[in-house]
Image (spheres, rainbow, N blue to C red):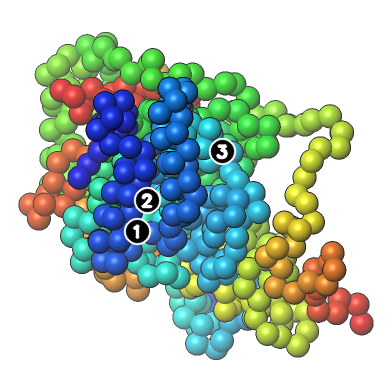
């Protein structure tokens, strides 16, 4: 099923990307071609196969003691902020 | 001029050069030629010179120094060093200064390496040619009308041009091995989890690995030795300690079983590349190795599986770039458009393409058909290798289907670009170690690379075989 313009608009919204009209059509054609290629996976029967989330079979949940350890200090955490005020990152209004 | 770690060690020991002189020579060659090649995004001159001066003081006093003392090393610009710009080749992070240092870098510093600068890369490591960088493409030092490969093109070029003997890159689908092949240097993607990802800007977390570039496989082993090991700060770090790779570089070729997967020697492989790989294998056979044809039957599905899994993980990892805590922020009137405009303006088209692809394949209604399906295919690909290891010890293939292509040649056809990863991708999906080393040139003088693959946690096997090939 070919990718429609509304599919692209929907995905762009989910991904928080403001595409221009030209970009939308450009990406639609390219993504459609890529998805057609990817659909070759459907020729494989994988009903009895379990998914691999991770290549490390022995991966344990890496937990540690719940004790306070040093972390990033405020000055460093704020040092790249485009907008800040005191010890806070400054953002657009979140609640109307 | 291609140097090795040993040649620098010798020069320092014999007092032929000081560490400061070595660093000066390095910067002189970069300033003379990097305008053309564009391997570096930024240079860390002040800290490099200070480190070299500190080492010269230690050497004068006879204080012991680290395994990489005085060796200039270039670092891919997606690896964080406290106080340096880390741009990931993107407008989104063009002014971002890292507030902390990656574990692999801390180990380099402890080993007394001299970090000289940050290298160019495809934006957020997405690409196979270093053409998607916000800072312009890197040129292949062997032929500057051609690409160096990607995404670690800057690191590969820095070593190939003789600026530095060592570099670090990252490999998610071939981004160390493919540029190594195209530039004529050695590059290793270690076993997944062998090198800490703490401080590597995440692209696809289940695939990313930091790895070394060098002029010889022996030097790859020296560099791996420094950066490998368990790290509590990386939840995907292998729990076991890394061995001393420098003690594991002997190999008895007469006992070696080499596998040539037929799927890697089929349509699409340039005949000159094919012949160069077969020549390497023939020589090993003459020295006593057993060579057999094997099959990795799901090879044809690897690129498709990767181009679901990697973009899906990337769409999640790149959600953090919203202009709030760091990076580029566009002017906007309200919250949602602040995000959408920042991201549309801050990211280049390849990144946007992959974010959208990943968002689509993870979205409601499509997750099972795409992401879950791709993960099942990943199981099949992993099993292909596990079955192969019952019959052979090492798998030998070409690294790339062709030699370096021209700048601009594949930029309008993303799918064609993706297909150039065809031989490298499966190793990332299976988590196995894989390296590329030079094995000749084509009729245009362009480098050809041979890829060696081994089972999980057998990185030393391919390093040893690579060393054997280059010394015999």
Circle on res. B39: 1
**Which residue is found at the position 56% from the left and 86% from the top?**
A20
Residue indicated by mark 2:
B155
Circle on res. B106: 3
Q: Give the Cα separation between the discs numbered 3 and 1.
A: 23 Å
Neighbourhood count class around disc 2 (C-alpha, 10 Å): few under 14, some 14–19, many 20 upward: many
B98 on left or right of B162 = right
Q: Is residue B400 placed above or below B283 in the rendered structure?
A: below
Dots 1 and 2: beta carbons under 8 Å?
yes
Q: How many marks?
A: 3
Q: Residue furthest left?
A: B443
**Which residue is found at the position 81% from the left and 37% from the top?**
A69
Q: Between residues B345 and B266, which one lies in front from this camera angle?
A: B345
Q: Is residue B234 placed above or below A84 in the rendered structure?
A: above
Quadrant into which the C terminus of chain B falls: top left
Q: Earlier in the sequence, mark 3 or mark 1?
A: 1
Q: Give the Cα separation between the discs numbered 1 and 2.
A: 7 Å
Q: Secondary structure at mark 2?
A: helix
Please tell me in which quadrant of the rendered image residue B458 appears: top left
Dots 2 and 3: beta carbons under 8 Å?
no
Picture coordinates of residue B285, whole percent (x, y): 16, 20
Of discs 2 and 3, which sits in the foreground? 3
Q: Earlier in the sequence, mark 1 or mark 2?
A: 1
Of discs 3 and 1, which sits in the foreground? 3
> What is the chain letter for disc 3?
B
Q: Earlier in the sequence, mark 2 or mark 3?
A: 3
Badge 3 and badge 1 both on one subunit: yes
């Amino acid at each position: 099923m070919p990718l429609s313009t509304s599919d692209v608009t929907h995905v762009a919204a989910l991904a928080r990307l403001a595409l221009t009209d030209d970009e939308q059509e450009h990406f639609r054609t390219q993504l459609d071609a890529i998805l057609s290629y990817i659909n070759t996976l459907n020729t494989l029967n994988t009903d009895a196969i379990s998914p691999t989330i991770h290549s490390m079979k022995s991966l344990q949940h890496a937990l540690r003691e719940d004790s306070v350890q040093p972390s990033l200090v405020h000055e460093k955490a704020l040092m790249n902020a485009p907008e800040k005020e005191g010890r806070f990152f400054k953002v657009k209004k979140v609640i109307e | 001029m291609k140097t090795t770690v040993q040649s620098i060690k010798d020069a320092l020991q014999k007092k032929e050069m000081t560490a400061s002189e070595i660093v000066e020579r390095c910067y002189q060659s970069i300033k003379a030629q990097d305008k053309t090649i564009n391997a570096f995004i930024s240079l860390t001159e002040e800290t490099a010179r200070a480190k070299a001066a500190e080492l010269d003081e230690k050497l004068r006093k006879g204080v012991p120094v680290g395994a990489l003392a005085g060796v200039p090393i270039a670092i891919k610009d997606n690896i964080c060093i406290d106080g340096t710009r880390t741009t990931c080749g993107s407008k989104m992070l063009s002014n971002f200064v890292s507030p902390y240092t990656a574990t692999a870098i801390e180990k380099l510093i402890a080993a007394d390496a001299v970090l000289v600068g940050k290298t160019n890369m495809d934006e957020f490591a997405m690409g196979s040619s270093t053409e998607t960088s916000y800072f312009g493409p890197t040129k292949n030092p062997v032929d500057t009308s051609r690409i160096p490969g990607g995404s670690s093109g800057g690191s590969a070029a820095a070593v190939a041009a003789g600026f530095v003997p060592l570099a670090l890159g990252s490999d998610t689908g071939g981004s160390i091995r493919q540029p190594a092949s195209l530039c004529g240097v050695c590059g290793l993607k270690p076993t997944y989890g062998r090198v800490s990802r703490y401080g590597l800007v995440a692209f696809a977390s289940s695939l990313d690995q930091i790895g070394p570039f060098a002029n010889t496989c022996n030097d790859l082993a020296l560099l791996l030795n420094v950066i490998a090991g368990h790290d509590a700060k990386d939840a995907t770090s292998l729990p076991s300690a890394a061995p001393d790779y420098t003690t594991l570089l002997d190999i008895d070729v007469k006992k070696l079983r080499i596998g040539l997967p037929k799927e890697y020697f089929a349509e699409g492989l340039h005949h000159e590349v094919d012949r160069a790989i077969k020549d390497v294998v023939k020589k090993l056979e003459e020295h006593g190795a057993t060579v057999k044809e094997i099959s990795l039957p799901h090879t044809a599905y690897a690129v498709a599986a990767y181009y679901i899994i990697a973009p899906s993980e990337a769409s999640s990892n790149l959600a953090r770039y919203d202009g709030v805590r760091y990076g580029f922020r566009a002017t906007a009137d309200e919250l949602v458009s602040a995000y959408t405009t920042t991201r549309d303006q801050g990211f280049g088209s390849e990144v946007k393409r992959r974010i959208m692809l990943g968002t689509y394949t993870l979205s409601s209604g499509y997750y099972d058909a795409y992401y879950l399906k791709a993960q099942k295919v990943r199981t099949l690909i992993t099993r292909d290798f596990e079955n192969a290891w019952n019959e052979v010890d090492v798998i030998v293939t070409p690294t790339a289907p062709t030699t370096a292509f021209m700048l601009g040649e594949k930029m309008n056809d993303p799918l064609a670009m993706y297909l150039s990863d065809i031989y490298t991708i499966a190793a990332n999906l299976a988590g196995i170690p894989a390296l590329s080393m030079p094995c000749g040139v084509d009729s245009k003088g362009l480098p050809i690379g041979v890829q060696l693959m081994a089972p999980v946690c057998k990185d030393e096997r391919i390093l040893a075989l690579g060393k054997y090939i280059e010394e015999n």
